[in-house]
Amino acid sequence: MNVVTIIISLAMAQYLLHLPILTLVALMLVATSMGVLQSILMIIVDLKRPKLNWDSEYAVAKQNLNLVFPMLLAMINILILVGAVALLENINVYMGLTILAILYIIATVMINRYLYKRQNELADKILM
């Protein structure tokens, strides 16, 4: 689902701003790496804080505090991007996007390793 949103956003950016194809590809790489990282982090949140006993369908959607975490992560991503723009303003746009993509990919690999190392421990919370 993240990829569909990314494609729609980039298509709108292309239509409105007429960005070069290389810029769109670089933005796609950064956005996709951010989306993958967010998905893995949300899996970890759901595994660490499973909410499996519900009284109604209403409770599933309205009383699940795990739904706050994607918003917090989005705010953190915005802060990271604003900080990156401030820190990397004097370098080439493509170099800045490459640095961001590499940082997100490294974070994804590290979080993925954590997930695989602790998968049994995390899964035990669901079974209890």
Image: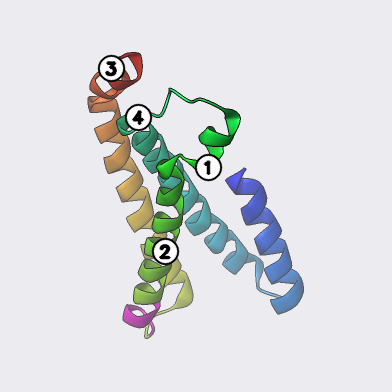
Distance from Cα at disc 2 to Cα at disc 1: 21 Å
- Span of residues in magenta: 85-89
Tell me the amino acid under the disc marked 2.
Met
Q: Are marks 4 and 1 in contact (CB under 8 Å)?
A: no
* Closest to the observer, 106 or 91: 106
Distance from Cα at disc 4 to Cα at disc 2: 22 Å
Magenta residues, dominant SS class: helix
Q: Are marks 2 and 1 in contact (CB under 8 Å)?
A: no
Disc sitting over residue 75 in the figure: 2
* Residue at screen point 35% across, 38% down: 45
Relative image position of residue 115 (x, y in whole percent): 29, 31
Question: To which residue does mark 3 refer?
Answer: 124
Disc 4 versus disc 1: nearer the observer: 1
Disc sitting over residue 29 in the figure: none
First along the sequence among labels 4 and 2? 4
* Residue at screen point 41% across, 44% down: 65
Is 86 inside the magenta-drawn segment? yes
Distance from Cα at disc 3 to Cα at disc 4: 9 Å
Tell me the amino acid under the disc marked 1.
Lys
First along the sequence among labels 2 and 1? 1
First along the sequence among labels 3 and 1? 1
Question: To which residue does mark 1 refer?
Answer: 62
* Residue at screen point 45% across, 41% down: 39
Relative image position of residue 105 (x, y in whole percent): 37, 49
Distance from Cα at disc 3 to Cα at disc 2: 30 Å
Q: Residues within 10 Å of mark 2 (few under 14, many from 20)?
A: few
Distance from Cα at disc 3 to Cα at disc 1: 25 Å
Is 27 inside the magenta-drawn segment? no
Colouring method of the image = rainbow
Q: In terms of secondary structure, where does tag 4 sit? A: helix
Question: To which residue does mark 4 refer?
Answer: 47
